[in-house]
Amino acid sequence: MDIIKHGLSSLLLFLLWNKGLIDGSDVNQTPILWRKQGDNATIHCNHTKGTYYNQMYWYRQLPGETMKQIVFTTTATPNHDFGDFSKDKFSATKPDAETGTFTVKNVEPGDKGLYFCAVSEHSDTDTCLIDGSDVNQTPILWRKQGDDATIHCNHTKSVEYNQMYWYRQLPGETMKLIVFTTTVKPDHDFGDFSKDKFSATKPDVETGTFTVKNLVPEDKGLYFCAVSEHSDTDTCES
């Protein structure tokens, strides 16, 4: 999960939806990007969800920090919202509903981090998409082959956010949902994944863990959690 070392960068796909939590197979971005110090680094993102998903968000997580939204783009306006971030350092394009780019200018060692895109469907409220600063997990975990690796996740959103999802992205593959957990029931939903390889806990609303058992080299990848609010329709998550 190292990103810029001596001016080199790689990037992680992470998705936030305001309608329908899915495995991310219809959203793709530049998986790994290497650039020399002083160069510009441009990440491409595209999706096949449909033209209604015309909003694209770009996020960054620096080592030891929480995730932050850098820019919001939409086809509805050519003016992208960079908030407190400088356009001298970052730029973005949104040529159509399905595609977009994000550029880190003049790459330097301090730009080391995880960069990723998210897309959402236009709505009048867009109240569910947030910057993730109140959800935290183990940032980097090193373990020997044969050991178990446990990742901890916690949030400070509210007691309504009692659902936790754990994702994995292996090199060269799309993001996949491994397990869904909730405080409502003790049986976690691993779908097609084996409980012999993975386990999870959800002791309370704010916390949860995910474990990869008996590590092998093929387990190397990006693992992350997402939390969502329980509702009758489950239309919002973060």
Image (spheres, helix red, strand yellow):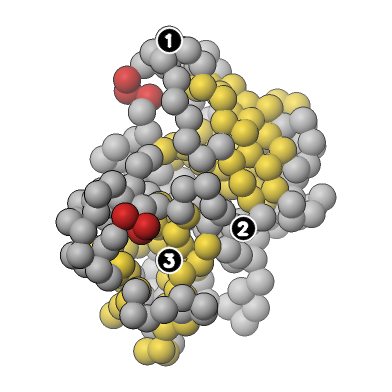
- In the visual, does 111 lie left or right of 148? left
Residue shown at 34% from the left, 80% from the top:
88
Residue shown at 59% from the left, 41% from the top:
137
Question: For mark 2, what is the residue?
Answer: 133
Q: Amino acid at mark 1?
A: Gly
- Residue 58, position as x, y percentages in the image: 43, 66
Secondary structure of residue under mark 3: strand
Q: For this rendering, which residue is in front, 50 or 154?
A: 154
- Residue 3, position as x, y percentages in the image: 33, 47
Q: Tag 3 or tag 1, which sits nearer the N-term?
A: 3
Secondary structure of residue under mark 2: loop
Q: Tag 2 or tag 3, which sits nearer the N-term?
A: 3
Question: For mark 1, what is the residue?
Answer: 146
Q: Is residue 105 above or below residue 201?
A: below
- In the visual, does 225 lie left or right of 118? right
What's the CA distance linking mark 1 and mark 2? 33 Å
Tag 1: Cα neighbours inside 10 Å, few (<14), some, or many (≥20)? Answer: few
What's the CA distance linking mark 3 and mark 2? 14 Å
Label ID, residue 58 = 3
Q: Amino acid at mark 3?
A: Trp
Q: Pointer 1 and pointer 3: residues touching (CB < 8 Å)? A: no
Residue shown at 51% from the left, 16% from the top:
148
- The quadrant where residue 185 appears: top right
Of the 4 image quadrants, the one containing the C terminus is bottom right
What's the CA distance linking mark 1 and mark 3? 36 Å
Q: Tag 2 or tag 1, which sits nearer the N-term?
A: 2
Secondary structure of residue under mark 1: loop
Q: Is residue 74 above or below residue 237?
A: below
Q: For this rendering, which residue is in front, 68 or 223?
A: 68
- Residue 92, position as x, y percentages in the image: 33, 76
